Image (cartoon, rainbow, N blue to C red):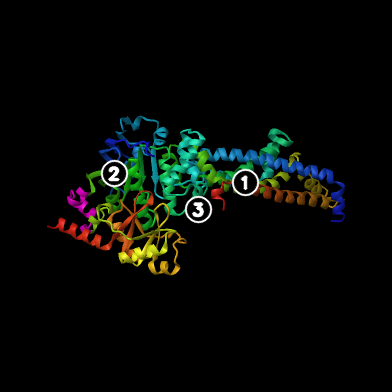
């Protein structure tokens, strides 16, 4: 994926959308610049025109006036179908075609672009790997056989299939449960580190905007931009009362959404590889004063927490299975996510994974408390 | 009802030929009706006015007496196969058209938007998304139509059309005469059997042509 196409900038110039028979325009003279390779979040109350604004970029909605550029190309002059084949599009609930297999769904745009069969097949497997779904297991399944989170992953894979420079996402994670949403967000950030696409992301959830966005545009009715800045700047200095209301109260807790796991000190847990010598693992854990061992597979991916005394009693580490519900966060997760995971787990620590889900360490609850105190100290001197 | 078995045995070669003719008439007109209904449905399903016009046409058309229609057509295109074919196609279209419209308008609009958003053309969206998803509903209409046409095809004999209807008509015209009842029963039972066979066949076709991901 290292040779994939990076993002291009998007520029909206005096874009207006006026529906016939309505007095006020849905989108009123919007001008904004979305830098290449960044995630820009469009946030605002429902009916503010954020989705309309986004859909004008791929011309699912035609602007009444104004111009939109991707890179140096004026999209309002392009052939609409051709344009859309070069813009990834992800909607809420993924919008997978139920009568096609996962593989065929992903292959839709490459086939429209007439790629040859070999290239398409290779691309399907590559993308499934990229979104952490085993190709052998999932390629030939049908959407109804997947969970909501898995469907959404396939939706993202489908949007990335033809390696478009620009990705439009319309509340993609709105219909999944909070834990799945947090994982999908983490995965998107991990993908973005590799891909550097330009992503326009519509949401009404300010916490999601703070977590994912390099920049946030807060919109009011008519898609009027009230404030367009980095999450830190918006939090520190809201433009007006509307933004303040929208950002919400509990700012110290919000600050936890701005600090990433990679920004705090990670601790070591007692670690053992599956199949390793049990006695050594037990004595190593005892030396650290730990009651639990985190067991990793042969690629350093965490499998499961195992109590030290069980290892001692069984005398083996070879039959440890994967715990699908293991609480874990990634380096790009926020401290808020880590705290959430910790509250559902019983360990007081949460496992941190990095690239390819490899184990990195653990975050302790004390670390989060310290960070909170520091943040509070910083915001109220 | 005396000697029904002998009656059928004596005339087996004629009866089986007429049954074949009857089935062939229904299957061919059903194919034509399906094609016409799909084309009409596709032409109207995006417009609300078109949709309600198609629904009204389908509902009102079914109240039209098939016998009267055949009579009118005989005056226009003379007797034989042609008026039977026109009548069967006309009635065959009605239930299918209704289901084509219901099926196509029932496709989840977010899927259509997602298809357009990926750069699928209008025609591509219709052929690769909307029709496959509407297909089970359309085939239900085809099955209803097939059953109905089996019955209507019997009336074709009135215009000297092909099929088992001739036995029913001649039985009725000779009421009380020798073998009159046998003649009517043979024609009717034959048509019932054909109707069951056709429905089984269409059921199989539906299964085979419905994409696996949406099979229930």
Q: Going 72% across and 41% down the picture, which residue do you hit?
A: B24
Q: Residues within 10 Å of mark 2 (few under 14, many from 20)?
A: many
Of helix, strand and loop, which mostly describes the magenta segment? helix
Query: Which residue is identified by label 2?
Result: A40
Q: CA distance from mark 2 to mark 1?
A: 47 Å
Q: Chain of mark 2?
A: A
Q: Going 76% across and 52% down the picture, which residue do you hit?
A: B189
Residue A238 among magenta residues? yes
Residue A281: which numbered mark, if any?
Answer: none
Query: Which residue is identified by label 1?
Result: B208
Q: Residues within 10 Å of mark 1 (few under 14, many from 20)?
A: few
Query: Residue A20, image x and y in percent?
Result: 34, 39
Q: Residues within 10 Å of mark 3 (few under 14, many from 20)?
A: some
Residue A145: which numbered mark, if any?
Answer: 3
State the extent of the magenta-drawn residues as a range: A232-252
Rendered position, A376 above or below B56: below
Q: Chain of mark 1?
A: B
Q: Going 84% across and 43% down the picture, which residue do you hit?
A: B13
Q: CA distance from mark 3 to mark 2?
A: 33 Å
Query: Residue A232, image x and y in percent?
Result: 21, 49
Q: Quadrant of the N terminus of chain B?
A: bottom right
Q: Determine if residue A122 is in view.
A: yes
The image quadrant of residue A28 is top left
Q: Secondary structure at mark 1?
A: helix
Q: CA distance from mark 3 to mark 1?
A: 20 Å
Whether residue B36 sits left or right of residue A311 in the image: it is right
């Amino acid at each position: 994926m290292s040779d994939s196409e990076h993002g291009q900038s998007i520029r909206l110039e005096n874009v207006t959308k006026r529906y016939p028979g309505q007095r006020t325009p849905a989108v009123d003279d919007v001008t904004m610049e979305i830098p290449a390779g960044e995630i820009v979040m469009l946030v605002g109350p429902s009916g503010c025109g954020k989705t309309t604004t986004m859909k004008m970029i791929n011309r699912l909605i035609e602007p009444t006036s104004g111009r939109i550029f991707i890179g140096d190309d004026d999209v309002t002059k392009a052939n609409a179908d051709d344009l859309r084949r070069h813009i990834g599009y992800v909607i809420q609930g993924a919008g997978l075609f139920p009568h096609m297999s996962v593989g065929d769904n992903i292959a839709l745009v490459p086939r429209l672009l007439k790629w040859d069969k070999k290239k398409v097949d290779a691309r399907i497997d590559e993308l499934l790997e990229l979104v952490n779904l085993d190709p052998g297991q999932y390629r030939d399944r049908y959407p109804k056989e997947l969970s909501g989170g898995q469907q959404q992953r396939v939706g993202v894979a489908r949007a990335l299939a033809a390696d478009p420079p620009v990705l439009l996402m319309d509340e993609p994670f709105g219909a999944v449960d909070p834990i799945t949403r947090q994982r999908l967000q983490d995965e998107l950030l991990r993908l973005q580190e590799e891909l550097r696409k330009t992503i326009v992301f519509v949401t009404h959830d300010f916490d999601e905007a703070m977590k994912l966005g390099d920049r946030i545009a807060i919109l009011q009715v008519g898609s009027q931009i009230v404030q367009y800045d980095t999450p830190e700047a918006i939090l520190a200095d809201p433009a007006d009362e509307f933004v303040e209301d929208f950002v919400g109260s509990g700012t110290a807790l919000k600050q936890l959404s701005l600090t990433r796991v990679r920004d705090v000190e990670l601790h070591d847990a007692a670690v053992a590889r599956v199949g390793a010598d049990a006695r050594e693992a037990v004595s190593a854990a005892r030396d650290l004063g730990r009651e639990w061992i985190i067991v990793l597979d042969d690629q350093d991916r965490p499998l499961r927490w195992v109590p030290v005394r069980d290892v001692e009693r069984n005398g083996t580490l070879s039959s440890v299975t994967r715990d699908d519900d293991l609480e874990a966060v990634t380096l790009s997760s926020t401290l808020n996510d880590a705290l959430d995971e910790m509250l559902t787990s019983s360990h007081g620590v949460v496992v941190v994974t990095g690239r390819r889900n490899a184990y990195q360490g653990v975050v302790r609850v004390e670390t989060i408390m310290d960070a909170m105190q520091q943040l509070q100290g910083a915001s109220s001197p | 009802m005396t000697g029904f078995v002998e009656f059928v045995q004596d005339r087996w070669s004629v009866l089986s030929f007429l049954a074949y003719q009857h089935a062939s008439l229904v299957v061919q007109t059903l194919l034509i009706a399906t094609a016409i209904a799909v084309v009409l449905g596709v032409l109207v399903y995006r417009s609300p006015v078109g949709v309600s016009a198609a629904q009204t046409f389908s509902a009102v058309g079914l109240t039209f007496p098939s016998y009267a229609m055949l009579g009118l057509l005989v005056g226009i295109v003379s007797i034989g196969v042609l008026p039977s074919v026109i009548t069967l196609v006309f009635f065959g279209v009605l239930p299918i058209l209704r289901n084509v419209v219901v099926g196509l308008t029932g496709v989840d609009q977010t899927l259509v938007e997602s298809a357009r958003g990926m750069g699928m053309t209008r025609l591509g969206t219709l052929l690769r998304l909307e029709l496959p998803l509407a297909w089970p509903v359309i085939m239900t209409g085809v099955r209803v139509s097939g059953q109905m046409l089996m019955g209507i095809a019997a009336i074709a004999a009135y215009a000297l059309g092909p099929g088992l209807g001739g036995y029913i008509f001649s039985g009725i015209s000779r009421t009380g005469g020798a073998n009159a009842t046998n003649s009517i029963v043979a024609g009717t039972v034959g048509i019932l059997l054909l109707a069951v066979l056709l429905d089984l066949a269409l059921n199989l076709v539906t299964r085979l042509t419905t994409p696996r991901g949406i099979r229930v």
